[in-house]
Image: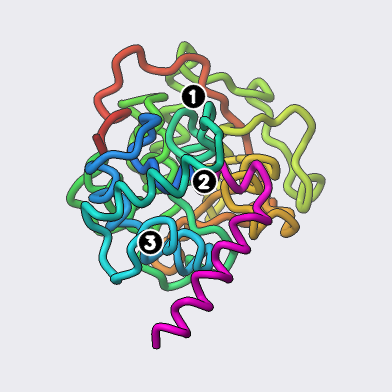
Amino acid sequence: MKKVLGILCALMLTALSLLSASAYDKAYQKGDADMNGRITIDDATLIQRYVAELVACDGFWPLFTADADNNGVVNINDVSLMQRHLAQFGTTLTQTPDGNATIAQAAVTLAYAERGMGYLAPGKQIYRDVFDLTIGDDDYMRSCDRFVCTAIRWSGADDNYPEGHVGVQAEYLDEHPEKWLDLFQGRFLSSEEYRYAPPEGLQPGDVIMEYRASDYRTHTAIYCGEGLIATIYPESADAGYEVASASYDDTAPQCTYWYMSSNYFRVFRCKQYETDSRYKNALQ
């Protein structure tokens, strides 16, 4: 058994030596769970909550980073070990790719890395935690409108963004031009024209609103852009995902392709984030 463990450790160390600078930053980020630039006891608590889903998404590396003493539990001993492991990288993480600094960042962080992972899934633990803190007691966690609301509130963009349904959110966006810019000035874009590719000018964090009162099908999602999704989830870098979304009753938030299923859609952009959001630091 010791021999096997020795071989495994050697393989891990070899993998460490081959990691790129971006992977170093990713490793530091996983270790520094509270993103304060230091590895502390608070990190062990936070990492414990996310380690299971990270293993499912990212393979053995996040588990190795979190459970540094390899006993199957993230504890106080891991803190000093992680600090030593990460110190060898000689890097300081100046910009963490995931988190909730923006609407897009929040959306991708809350979403599963790959299309299909959210189907009949409970949602990432961090999404369930943030949902409870921003929306609370609600039966529609797997729903496009609730997901968009959760990401927007958690990012600190708009504390009053309604939970849903989609029609209520569409009315809210129209009623608050001081907060939300109608990117195409009231014009409904045809989904036939933009079925598989977004119109020019979209930016990460833009809210896609597939809603028209006369249409039965409604949907909302957040445009995040390929670059951000690829940065947060390198394993999805070649998938071409541009959007984070969920679907009523059957799909938890996940990264996916741009695809317009309704006849018409609009796009809204937050003009001004809250100066003192009550949700921005909900997890701290």
User: Quadrant location of residue 175?
Assistant: top left
Give the CA separation, mark 1 to mark 3. 30 Å
Q: What residue type is labelled 2?
A: Val
In the rendered image, which residue does mark 1 sit on?
174
Q: Measured from the top left, where is residue 58 in percent x and y? A: 53, 63
The structure residue drawn at horizontal position 42% and vertical position 73%, both measured from the top left corner, is 120
| Magenta-drawn stretch contains 67 | no
Q: Of callouts 1 and 3, which one flags the residue occurring earlier in the amino acid sequence?
A: 3
Q: Distance between the residues labelled 1 and 2?
A: 25 Å
Tag 2: Cα neighbours inside 10 Å, few (<14), some, or many (≥20)?
many
Q: Nearer the viewer, residue 238 or 256?
A: 238
Give percent across and percent down for residue 195: 76, 52
Q: Disc 3 marks which amino acid?
A: Gly
Disc 2, SS: helix
Q: Give the range drawn in magenta.
A: 1-27
Q: How crowded is mark 3: few (under 14 residues within 10 Å), some or many (20 or more)?
A: many
